[in-house]
Amino acid sequence: MTTYGELTPEEALERLAELEAIDVRGAHEFEGPLGRIAGARLIPLAALPERASEIPRGQPLLLICRSGARSARACAQLGELGLGPTFNLIGGMIAWNRAQLPVERTSPASPLALLESALAWLAQVTQQAPDAARAKLLAELGQPPTALADPTRERVARALDAIERLAGAQPDLELSLAAFRGALAGL
């Protein structure tokens, strides 16, 4: 059985200079509301086997995801491939954000880009297809499909309120919505 270490966000921050940080989330998450650890390399979990050759051998690896579950699987996979030692970030980017540690975030270029990011987040956390998440949001807003084609800041604010209602009890709900609303204020 392959083993791996675990680091709290604070421990990981202290050791970051000696670790190769690999983020195994999807690209929309890496660019999304929880942000990313500075210097982290994006290699989504599904792409890990074919991209393992990009990871330096003999280097301690910090594996990162949203909550720590996918990164734990990545630690095991990379350990089986002879890479590592590997360390899982306990609690993932949710815990990192809760600890108020530094993150890099991508600012959305427009209200539409922000809305698309929020919809991608909603689809992921509610485990539904993006089109289904969009349809539920439109129904919640009582709007036709064209209503979100070129949204104003006000329409995005209303959409974020609806997304909050639709998301249910997600562990990163308050963190993600605060990031989305902060980004909207900056547009």
Image (tube, helix red, strand yellow):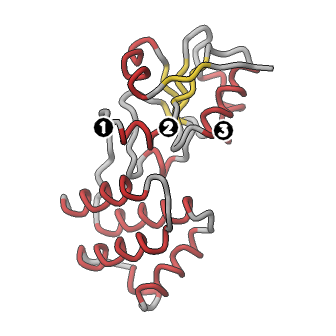
Q: Quadrant of residue 182?
A: bottom left
Q: Secondary structure at mark 3?
A: helix
Q: Locate the N terminus by quadrant.
A: top right
Residue denoted by label 2: 92
First in sequence: mark 1 or mark 3?
3
Q: Secondary structure at mark 2?
A: helix
Q: What's the residue at 36%, 41% (across, down)?
A: 97
Q: In the rendered structure, which amino acid carries the disc numbered 2?
A: Gly
First in sequence: mark 1 or mark 2?
2
Residue denoted by label 3: 47
Please, which residue is most extreme toward the top here?
58
Residue depth check, mark 2 versus mark 3: number of the one nearer the observer = 2
Residue 93 left/right relative to 86: left
On the image, the x and y values in percent for residue 154 come to: 24, 78
Residue denoted by label 1: 100
Q: What's the residue at 41%, 48% (across, down)?
A: 31
Q: Disc 1 to disc 2, how far (Cα)?
A: 13 Å
Q: In the rendered structure, which amino acid carries the disc numbered 3?
A: Ala
